């Protein structure tokens, strides 16, 4: 595994945040909060040398698979897939538009129109883990080296199917097809559809529950700190004999002041003016310095002009 450049990963995650805000504003609908909480984890997975893929051959049979079970946060995944070359940046603003391949939840598409990197249709919460288990077992039975990664939301972990799958994974296949090629990340941002998870149905003790079913548990105290994320993934890949779950504490709406820890932003896209403020905050630029910054960074200036034009429509 190549050494991870933490500064580079943080810069990629920052740029991906800008794109998430941009495409959700174009769509006028979607889920910014969970997309922003998950993007550091996705960045480390795809650009930190952990997920094996070939940008020139998206359907390489030996590739690792990633299943985004919390499918409403697919804007974060689309942005990452564009960054690795599976999609064009020009296609991203078609998110949720009529006729677009980029639907509001992961959908591979019909033969000939499949979206590279979208391995399965997900978004009906609770089902992604079962799909990942099936893929992990298939890889073992076909003697492929592919590893399967999945991501769940913590609110999603209230779904009964998650726990049926969690109980099964350490036992499916027995010792012959042991699923130690399965890695699941829980994006624990503490907020679900319209309220805080603990006020709806608390999950605690979450780590102990996974461990009791036979999973190796790794907890990441700050799911936005690249060093901690990379350390967690490295430790996960050293585990043998059982599947691994990484439980990462994150902040919903991370990096945008008016979105952070605010349930409102689970499923509401920003208005153009809000989007420009969000992008300025993500880039860490003060309001007074903003005009000069835009003068030095034509790509960001173009995005801002594009979003401001949406205000007048």
Image (tube, rainbow, N blue to C red):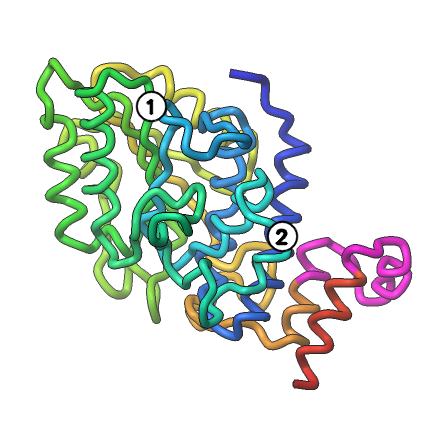
Secondary structure of the residue carrying tag 2 is helix
With 53 as the anchor, is 207 left or right in this view?
left
Q: Residue at x 46, y 59 (%)?
A: 102
User: Mark 2 sits on what residue?
Assistant: 89
Mark 2 / mark 1, whichever is N-terminal: 2
Secondary structure of the residue carrying tag 1 is loop
Q: Is residue 307 magenta?
A: no
With 3 as the anchor, is 208 left or right in this view?
left
Q: Residue at x 64, y 73 (%)?
A: 274
Q: Is residue 153 visible?
A: no
Q: Position of residue 65 (x, y in %)?
A: 36, 34
The front one of 11 and 249 is 11
Highlighted range, magenta: 279-300
Q: Residues within 10 Å of mark 2 (few under 14, many from 20)?
A: some
Q: Is residue 107 visible?
A: yes
Residue 261 versus residue 271 in the image, above or below? above
User: Mark 1 sits on what residue?
Assistant: 146
Distance Cα–Cα, label 2 vs label 1: 28 Å
Q: Residues within 10 Å of mark 1 (few under 14, many from 20)?
A: many
Q: Position of residue 137 (x, y in %)?
A: 18, 27
Q: Name the dominant secondary structure of the magenta segment.
A: helix
Q: Is residue 298 magenta?
A: yes
The front one of 114 and 243 is 114
Total number of numbered discs in the rendering? 2
């Amino acid at each position: 595994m190549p050494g991870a450049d933490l500064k580079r990963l943080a810069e990629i995650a920052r740029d991906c945040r800008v794109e998430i805000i941009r495409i959700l504003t174009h769509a006028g609908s979607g889920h910014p909060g969970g997309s922003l909480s998950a993007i550091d984890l996705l960045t480390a997975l795809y650009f930190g040398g952990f997920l094996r893929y070939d940008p020139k051959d998206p359907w390489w049979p030996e590739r690792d698979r990633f299943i985004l079970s919390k499918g409403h946060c697919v804007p974060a995944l689309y942005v990452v897939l564009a960054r690795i070359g599976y999609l064009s940046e020009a296609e991203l603003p078609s998110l949720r538009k009529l006729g677009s391949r980029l639907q509001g939840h992961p959908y591979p598409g019909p033969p000939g129109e499949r979206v590279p990197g979208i391995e399965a249709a997900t978004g009906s919460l609770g089902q992604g883990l079962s799909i990942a288990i099936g893929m992990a077992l298939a890889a073992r039975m076909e003697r492929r080296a592919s590893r399967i990664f999945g991501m769940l939301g913590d609110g999603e972990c209230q779904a009964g199917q998650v726990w049926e799958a969690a109980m099964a994974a350490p036992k499916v296949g027995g010792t012959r097809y042991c699923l130690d090629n399965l890695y699941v990340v829980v994006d624990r941002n503490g907020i679900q559809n319209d309220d805080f998870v603990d006020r709806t149905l608390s999950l605690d003790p979450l780590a102990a529950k996974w461990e009791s079913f036979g999973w190796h548990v790794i907890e990441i105290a700050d799911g936005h700190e690249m060093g901690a994320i990379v350390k967690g993934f490295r430790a996960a890949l050293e585990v043998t004999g059982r599947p691994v779950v990484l439980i990462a504490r994150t902040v919903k709406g991370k990096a945008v002041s008016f979105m952070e820890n605010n349930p409102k932003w689970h499923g509401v896209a920003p208005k153009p003016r809000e989007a420009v403020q969000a992008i300025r905050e993500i880039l860490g630029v003060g309001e007074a310095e903003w005009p000069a910054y835009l003068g030095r960074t034509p790509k960001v200036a173009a995005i801002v002009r594009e979003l401001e034009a949406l205000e007048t429509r």
